[in-house]
Image: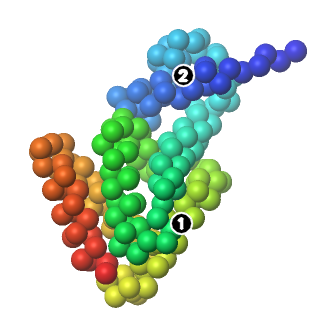
Amino acid sequence: MARLRSPEKRRALLEAAIVEIAEAGLGAATAKIAARAGVAEGTLFTYFATKDELFNELYVDLKSEVYDRLNDGFPLKGSAERRAWYVWSTFLAWAIEFPLRRKVSLQLTMSDAVSAETRARVGEKRGAIDGLFAELAGREGLRGLPAGYGASLMSSMQEATMDFIAKSPRQRKVLIERGFALFWRAVR
């Protein structure tokens, strides 16, 4: 009879993977991930058949965490500027609160180990956010540019904002507000 898998052990493995990947990159050893989670390496492979499966599940977990936060309280009836501010500030709050999660999420986003199917599965959670960026794409600042350019522009400007917040934490509020003002000026 197959043993039931513990949700607590699965969670511990995912959390351990975040720390190990943040420290060592995607080459992090599964033995170290398992040890950090307090389980044998073989146990890791009862939860995730391969390292790529672990990466895919971690990608889903991290992206779902962000999108769940963004979707919770999303101002569906707000102006485009209000909705963009919500995406801007809510994502930055998450990224600043969880720097290791952000770092690992970026690495997984760039990784070929994360399958197109996994990316599509996570993409389903972006509904209102995608709607906002589709609307922004029709504005003068983004008109005629490739699909996704507005979202990429916001993401890049958020990264710059986080970099400067790390260097000057006392300027956090002004950096977040003025960074958004620059983004909005570019796309309005």
Quadrant assignment, res 44: top right
How far is the residue under mark 2 from the one under mark 1? 31 Å
- Please report the residue visible at 27 percent of the width from the left and 70 percent of the height from the top: 183
Q: Nearer the viewer, mark 2 or mark 1?
A: 1
> Is the residue 96 above or below the residue 42 in the image?
below
Name which residue type carries label 2. Answer: Ala
Q: Residues within 10 Å of mark 2 (few under 14, many from 20)?
A: some
Please give left or right for residue 117 compared with residue 1 in the image: left
Q: Quadrant of the N terminus?
A: top right
- In the image, what residue occupies the spot 51% across and 68% down? 76
The label number, if any, that marks residue 12 in the structure image: 2
Where residue 97 appears, x then y in whole percent? 33, 39
Looking at the rendered image, the quarter that the C terminus falls into is bottom left
Q: Residue 166 lies in what quarter of the image?
A: top left
The residue type indicated by label 1 comes to Ala
**Which structural element holds mark 1?**
helix
Residue contact between numbered discs 2 and 1, judged by CB atoms under 8 Å: no
Q: How many marks?
A: 2
Which label sits on residue 91?
none
